[in-house]
Image (cartoon, rainbow, N blue to C red):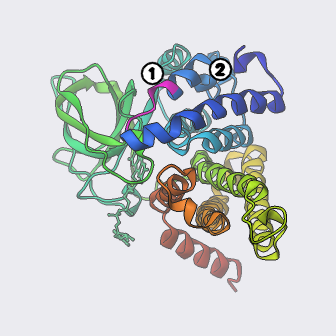
Amino acid sequence: MKFQDLPALDDKLAMMDELARRFAERASAADEENRFVYENIEDLKQSGYTSLTVPAEYGGQDISLYEMVRLQEKIAEGDGSTSLSIGWHMGIMKNLAEKKMWEEGLFAHICGEVLNGALLNGASTERQTGSPTRGGKPQTTAKLEGGEWIISGRKTFTTMSPVLDYFIVSAAIADSDDKAGFLVPRKVAGLHIEETWDSIAMRGSGSHDLVLDKVRIPKHYLVERFDKGSRRANGWLLHIPACYMGIAQAAQSYAVSFAKSYSPNSIEGSIIDLPNVQQKIGEMELELMSVRTFLYEVARRWDESSDDERERLSPALGAVKLKVTNTAIHVVDLAMRVVGARSLSAANPLQRYYRDVRAGLHNPPMDDTTIQLLARHASDRHDG
Ligand SMILES: Cc1cc2nc3c(=O)[nH]c(=O)nc-3n(C[C@H](O)[C@H](O)[C@H](O)COP(=O)(O)OP(=O)(O)OC[C@H]3O[C@@H](n4cnc5c(N)ncnc54)[C@H](O)[C@@H]3O)c2cc1C
């Protein structure tokens, strides 16, 4: 059975739930060994999931942003690293399909590759720039020579690097002030992955360094120019809050199940009936319910909007990412308080959720940028 055989979202979610249970069984060992979760990505490929955001005209399913968010959240209930990893690929394909930024022939070729299992992600971060959302100039350079681009540099945080087939690399164009994105296939001379990922969060995401040493790619693999003021609303980035939502849900589920079964001999029955525990479980439920509603609502609005209307959704997209990720951190904290000191045991999944969920703060857009955007938004609305 493949996702392609299941038109209804509920059926897709049920199938993803089964996969997520498998991912949950592998998560602890992968985290302990700081090992990329190859098996999970392979399962997702075999299930047909990785081509669901390819447009229907190129043989894909063209799933909506709402569907993508729901499925990504479900993956994260099993394993956050897997959700964040495959989320970049799913979201990028969705974004390319919606914005039609690439030359048609090249996009059609990549869609064909993705139908055959190829995976892609953006490699935009560098040590010298920090988050690319801050506007720093990449130290990675691209020089046109003999009809080919020659690219050199080093990218950090290249999530899913162990299995990527294509990297979308940002680079400064030599002898100019221009920046652009380049499609770099994995199988080119001069490209290698340096296994630098030593983070305590999202250890299974393989977010290593990508090193490019005079890599040569065809001229038309310059896929996007980053002009000043060319930033556009990015609905696809909702895969990020979906991921942290899923981790928070997993934490709450664990805490509830623990509270139902833990029966210290100071009380009759289990701690689930104690007012102090119910207070925390109820608070978690309230938090999850409110951010989930916010997340789904913004995803649906994106799906129902025209291109012009989507550009006006940036404040809501930023707000939902900020709210979900910060709430997810709070929910994991509450779950740990319910479970008590056992939550700090290396064998307990909550300590992994605690580390993983913090990564959300350092995925785009950053909180301070969002707050500034919201302040401008509020102020613009009251102009005059
Ligand atoms: C798990 C994970 C996976 C990731 N996957 C990818 C990926 O696949 N591809 C990719 O390209 N990137 C990826 N990233 C990188 C991510 O998008 C950020 O680029 C990275 O986390 C660095 O962000 P930062 O805010 O920590 O760094 P910095 O931008 O260096 O910021 C560090 C501190 O300095 C402050 N600061 C720096 N510059 C400014 C400024 N101009 N204005 C105001 N404050 C500033 C920040 O507020 C912050 O406090 C990933 C990150 C994580 C954590």
Mark 2, ligand 1, within 8 Å: the answer is no
- Whether residue 128 sits left or right of residue 227 in the image: it is left
Q: As rendered, which of 166 and 221 lies closer to the eye?
A: 166
- Whether residue 200 sits left or right of residue 351 in the image: it is left
Image quarter of residue 76: top right
Quadrant hosting ligand 1: bottom left
The magenta stretch spans residue 376: no
Image quarter of residue 289: bottom right
Residue for badge 1: 106
The disc labelled 1 sits on which kind of residue?
Leu
Tell me where the magenta segment starts and ends, as one range: 35-39
Q: Which mark is residue 60?
A: 2
Q: Quadrant of the N terminus?
A: top right
One can see residue 189 in this view: yes
One can see residue 143 in this view: no
Name the N-terminal-most of marks 1 and 2: 2
Q: As rendered, which of 233 and 51 lies closer to the eye?
A: 51
Q: Main secondary structure of the magenta part?
A: loop
- Whether residue 379 sits left or right of residue 230 in the image: it is right
- x, y percent for residue 81: 50, 42
- x, y percent for residue 161: 36, 34
Up-down relation of residue 54 to residue 100 (above or below): above
Up-down relation of residue 125 to residue 365 (above or below): above
